[in-house]
Amino acid sequence: MKYMLMLAVVGMLFASAAALGRFRMPTVVTTTCCKEVSSAMIKNIIDFKLQYAQPPCLKAIIFITTDQKQYCTDPNARWVAKRLKELSALKKQ
């Protein structure tokens, strides 16, 4: 009886693994994300990207500077909204 039960459990595990194999998630992560944010003001900003919260990533504004460095910034920092408006206006020109 124990042998039959064990066989049934093993069979179900193999069937589950085979079914999951068709719905695989990507195995290689090609991008990095902000896991910490800062409210410190950044200078020489030329562009920005929005990052949405999807664990382990936090909601952030990624500012890109003239030297191509990227900074993870708290979207709720006081100065960020004004800077985003300025950058958006420049992009529209």
Image: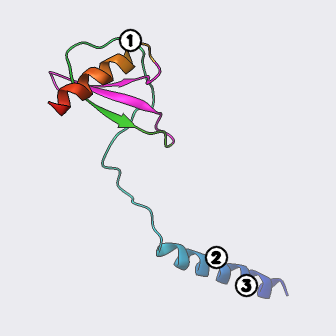
Which residue is rendered at x = 48% and y = 39% of the image? 53
Question: Could you say which is closer to the camera, residue 27 or residue 81?
Answer: 81
- Disc 3 + disc 2, Cβ < 8 Å: no
User: Magenta residues?
Assistant: 55-76
Label 3 sits on what residue type? Ala
Task: State the SS at label 2.
Answer: helix
Q: Position of residue 51 (x, y in %)?
A: 39, 37
The residue singled out by tag 1 in the image is 40
Sequence-first disc among 1 and 3: 3
Q: Disc 2 marks which amino acid?
A: Leu
Q: Earlier in the sequence, mark 1 or mark 2?
A: 2
Q: Quadrant of residue 2?
A: bottom right
Q: Is the residue marked by circle 3 packed among few (<14), some (14-19), or many (20+) residues within 10 Å?
A: few
Q: In whole angstroms, how far apart are the C-alphas of marks 1 and 3? A: 59 Å
Badges 1 and 2: C-beta atoms under 8 Å apart?
no
| Disc 3/disc 2 C-alpha distance (Å) | 9 Å
Look at the image and tell me whether residue 17 can be seen.
yes
Q: Is residue 69 visible?
A: no
Give the label, 1 or 3, closer to the camera: 1
> What residue is disc 3 on?
8
The answer to whether 15 appears left or right of 23 in the picture is right
Above or below, 22 relative to 89: below
Mark number, residue 13: 2
Identify the residue at the far right of this view.
1
